[in-house]
Image (tube, rainbow, N blue to C red):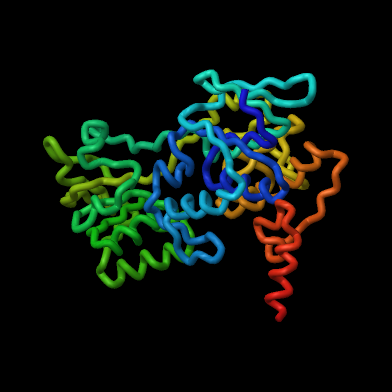
Amino acid sequence: MIKTDILIIGAGPTGLFTVFEAGLLKLKCHLIDSLPMPGGQCSEIYPKKPIYDIPSHPEILAGDLIKKLEKQIEPFQPKYTLGESAVSIEKTKDDHFIVTTDLGTRHMAPVVAIAGGLGSFEPRKPPLDRLTHFEDKGVNYIIKNPELYKNKKIVIAGGGDSALDWTIFLEGIGAFVTLIHRRIEFRGALDSVDKVQKLKNKGRIQLITPAEVISLKGEDKLSSIVIEHDGNQFSIECSYFIPLFGLTPKLGPIANWGLEIDKNAIKVDNTLDYQTNIPGIYAIGDVNTYPGKLKLILCGFHEATLMCQSAFKRIYPDKRNVLKYTTVSGVNGFDGSKKEAAKSIIKSID
């Protein structure tokens, strides 16, 4: 039996940052993730995708963000159960939870934080003949290695942030990009839309809207696609077709834990601490829902911070937690070395 203070289900960005906030409160964490490495989608699906809305980072690759988070939480020595999925949960007489994985590993903690992102997921695939035939032969749903597309003709289909961001990024490394969207308006960030429009105006990418890919051509590998635009059909040569229509998320076994679910997300109380309908079980990050919810990494960081404060009160109901700023105490200052923190302040004044 693995015992800890906070059991975190999901080792994506929100789960990893939870370790940091918990560590400041001297709470130990153990993380469970079905993937073989920490990082969630940032590591598995788009490690080379640039992220633009992380404070202090005008641009950071998803994989690099995970590396920095892992470095940030090193002082708190988190433990991991990787390559296993949490499948069942039971409550003990002393108000703890026992979570068991699909491989039978048992974990016990007074607090469970579900930070499973979108859960398990599958790419949304367009209804095209021979689509599966060209999978891994020119049709890719996830961009893992951007260098693969350098100096290649590629067609991206989609109207969200992923389609826009990858268009900008891949053009920047030398790919010949055609972006296709079935509507004139895009759903992504306005700044990204503006950048794509500027690339089109400069002739650096081809932008075709409103349009749809209606068929794929080629023998052993993809060689071209057929597009329908303004009632006309025409072909475009390409080596890769990347439809980015999002992911179909599934909560998996967690959906059967007695939690309140709304549209495949876990309902939480956002007025205080992001606790679910079961006291002691929290849901943070993309896996939760509440009025005004935004599925952003930085929102997950905020939710993790408040959740840890609530978890401390649950674990130590008789202790008073005084908020300490890391600018004063530093990370090591939270392990009792107040004297060293004071010396550093005096030195900085001198």
In this view of the protein, can residue 30 be seen by the observer? yes
* Residue at image location 64% in from the left, 31% down from the top: 261
* Residue at image location 20% in from the left, 45% down from the top: 225
In this view of the protein, can residue 183 be seen by the observer? no
Query: In terms of depth relative to the viewer, which is nearer, 312 or 328?
Result: 328
Q: Quadrant for residue 99, please give it.
A: top right
Tell me: 282 left or right of 11.
Answer: right
Q: Compared to 77, does 257 lie above or below?
A: above
Residue 31 at x, y percent in the picture:
57, 36
Task: Please state, as top left, top right, bottom left or bottom right, where the C terminus lies in the image.
Answer: bottom right
* Residue at image location 39% in from the left, 53% down from the top: 49
Query: In terms of depth relative to the viewer, which is nearer, 9 or 132?
Result: 9
Residue 55 at x, y percent in the picture:
56, 63
Q: Compared to 224, does 83 lie above or below?
A: above
Q: Residue furthest bottom?
A: 350
Residue 328 at x, y percent in the picture:
72, 65
